[in-house]
Image (spheres, rainbow, N blue to C red):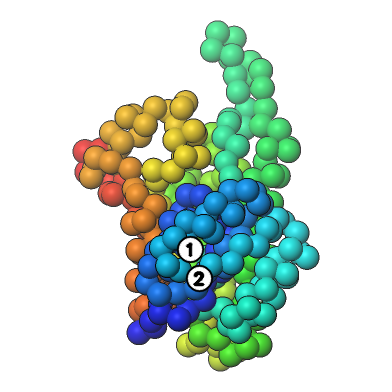
Amino acid sequence: MLDIRGSVAVITGGAHGIGRALGEYWVAGGGKVVLADVSEELLEEAKRSLESLGGEAVAVTCNVVSEADCSWLAQRAIDLFGKINLVAPCAGITRDGPVLDTDKETGKVIGKMSLENFQVVMNINLTGVFLTVRECVEQMINHDCRGLVCLISSTSSLGAAEQFNYSSSKAALSVAPRVLTAELFRRGLAGRIRCVAVAPGYVDTGPARATMNVKPVGKAVDQVPIGRLIDPYEIASLVGELYRNEALAGDVYYIHGGLRLGPKG
């Protein structure tokens, strides 16, 4: 079993939502956190929040689609703390909309998902994760670190209407733990560096609630058997358990309150 105490977590998207909750959870358990986000202002606020809990946190402004930024992020963690034990790429966005929208009366196409809206989601949600993982795991290997890469997928990876871009990016992250685990296994590293993914359902975060303006929160909750949204701290707690238990590797762990069962089970 791994211990969070004294461990070092690198968390992108760390200024809000799941990333911030995970940072707070980590310092509460005695770990150290390198928080990364593209928003310097929100990042500093999150850092102060972690420090108010008595934790040790460092803020690194990072654009996850920049190779240079991701390399600097990983190097910064090593320079400051000498190791990386948890890599949690939480940075992600949505740009929901139909691939093709049609007029209700004529049935003719009146709109399309723009290439820009498709690509920006894929870039941040998939390319950003690839770069974060590649750079951090390189440092983990070269500095003999032991720990976990925990990707943030989604129940949308199973396919959701008007989320061709988002669902595709999250589906890729659902298969990534198998790919990375297989590569590490072939090199004799899978016992030291594991990779998993967590796949939340409807999460009670600001961005999620903004998305649900089209689909009211109440309607979303009606689909969840436990009758509520998932708290970001519940996801952070799951990540903590996955980190501690070294038998868990190469799989996706759903946390959705029974959402996949449907409202009637």
- The total of numbered circles placed on residues is 2
Residue 198 visible somewhere in the drawing: no
Residue 171 image point, x, y percent: 53, 54
Q: Secondary structure at mark 2?
A: strand
Q: Secondary structure at mark 1?
A: helix
- What's under tag 1, amino acid-wise? Glu
| Between discs 1 and 2, the one toward the N terminus | 1
Residue 187 image point, x, y percent: 60, 89
Q: Is residue 12 left or right of residue 254?
A: right
Residue positioned 24% across, 40% down in the render: 227
Asked if 96 appears above or below 122 in the picture, the reply is: above
Residue lying at the far right in this picture: please name it.
68
Q: Which mark is residue 56?
A: 2
Crowd class of label 1 (few under 14; some 14 to 19; many from 20; radius 10 Å)? some
**Which one is in front, 67 or 126?**
67
Q: Quadrant of the C terminus?
A: top left
**Which one is in front, 208 or 178?**
208
Q: Quadrant of the N terminus?
A: bottom left
Q: Which mark is residue 51?
A: 1
Residue positioned 69% across, 44% down in the render: 120
Where, by quadrant of the figure, is residue 26 drawn? bottom left
Asked if 217 appears above or below 31 in the picture, the reply is: above
> Are dots 1 and 2 in contact, CB under 8 Å?
yes
Q: Is residue 61 left or right of residue 144?
A: right
Residue positioned 44% across, 60% down in the render: 52
- What's under tag 2, amino acid-wise? Glu
Q: Which mark is residue 173?
A: none
Residue 55 image point, x, y percent: 45, 68
